[in-house]
């Protein structure tokens, strides 16, 4: 296994930082030194500690990610993160390792980390046997002022209600202030199915289905017109 690299996360949104911390916690070759909510906070960290890699949000108040990237030591590599696809060109003009579009899935993040190792001659690539162990079986979500561990195999279905998401588990429900698209980006794609703009279901827990709804236990989850074709294709070929 290669020596660990030190990284920091810089993003003004706490949910975005939590997602990256959760993803990176599974990757043994990466050590998260700090999670910063501003470029100013990050400046202090990189002046005090040896940092190899920064996961950097582009669109931040006061000092943008692009301005911050231009001002730091060029030996520190950068993986840009943002919700805005149009920033990609500017990010690569600064010779970034990669550019990640939110919501960031674990698989996409892993690709970016592997790219970092491949491009830096001072570090070895992550061994294949380690890469195979990196698939996470859970996520953490913020609820009631703490981070709650949600195991994928315990999820029945996920429901969006306004600015909140209800994660229905066997025996309980966890409510988090997060978008359903952000949650979807953190789930293993082969195990979950989006049926509606407001619903995601666990494939393993589907009891029956029609062209209009999916049954999980006593719950009927709607299948919207816009998702119907893709839902039926997945279910009929599964």
Image (tube, rainbow, N blue to C red):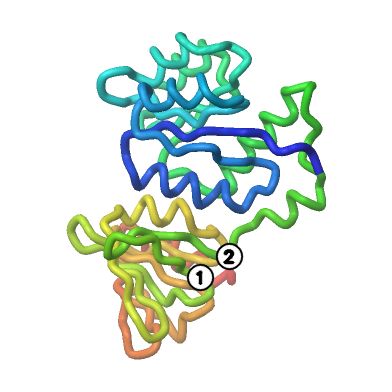
Element on which disc 1 rests: strand
Tell me which label, 1 or 2, sits earlier in the chain: 2
Q: Which quarter of the figure is the C terminus placed in? A: bottom right
Residue 225 seen in this snapshot: no
For the N terminus, the quadrant is top right
90 vs 32, left or right, is: left
Q: CB under 8 Å between callouts 1 and 2? A: yes
Q: Is residue 12 above or below residue 200?
A: above
Residue at position x 81%, y 32% from top?
124
Question: Residue 67, position in %: x, y?
Answer: 39, 12
- The quarter holding residue 38 reads top left
Quadrant of residue 163 within the rendered picture: bottom left
- Residue 137 versus residue 72: which sits nearer the camera? 72
Q: How many marks?
A: 2
Q: Provide the residue designation for mark 2.
A: 137
Q: Label 1: how many residues lie within 10 Å, few (<14), some (14-19) or many (20+)?
A: few
Residue at 81% x, 47% y: name it.
Answer: 128
Q: Nearer the viewer, residue 118 or 192?
A: 118
Residue 74 in which image quadrant? top right
Say what secondary structure mark 2 lies in: loop
């Amino acid at each position: 296994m290669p020596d660990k690299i030190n990284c920091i996360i810089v993003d003004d949104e706490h949910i975005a930082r939590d997602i990256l911390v959760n993803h990176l916690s599974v990757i043994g070759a990466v050590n998260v030194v700090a999670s910063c909510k501003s470029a100013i906070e990050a400046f202090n960290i990189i002046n005090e500690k040896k940092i190899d890699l920064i996961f950097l949000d582009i669109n931040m108040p006061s000092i943008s990610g692009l301005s911050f990237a231009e001002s730091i030591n060029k030996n520190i590599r950068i993986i840009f993160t943002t919700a805005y696809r149009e920033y990609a060109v500017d990010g690569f003009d600064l010779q970034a390792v990669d550019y990640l579009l939110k919501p960031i899935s674990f698989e996409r993040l892993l690709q970016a980390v592997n790219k970092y190792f491949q491009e830096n001659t001072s570090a070895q690539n992550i061994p294949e046997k380690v890469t195979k162990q990196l698939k996470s079986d859970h996520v953490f979500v913020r609820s009631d002022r703490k981070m709650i561990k949600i195991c994928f195999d315990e999820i029945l279905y996920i429901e969006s209600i306004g600015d909140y998401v209800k994660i229905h588990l066997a025996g309980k429900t966890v409510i988090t202030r997060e978008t359903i698209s952000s949650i979807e980006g953190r789930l293993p794609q082969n195990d979950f199915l989006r049926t509606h703009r407001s619903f995601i279901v666990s494939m393993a827990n589907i009891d029956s289905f029609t062209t209009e709804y999916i049954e999980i236990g006593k719950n009927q989850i709607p299948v919207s017109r816009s998702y119907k074709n893709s839902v039926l294709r997945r279910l009929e070929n599964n």
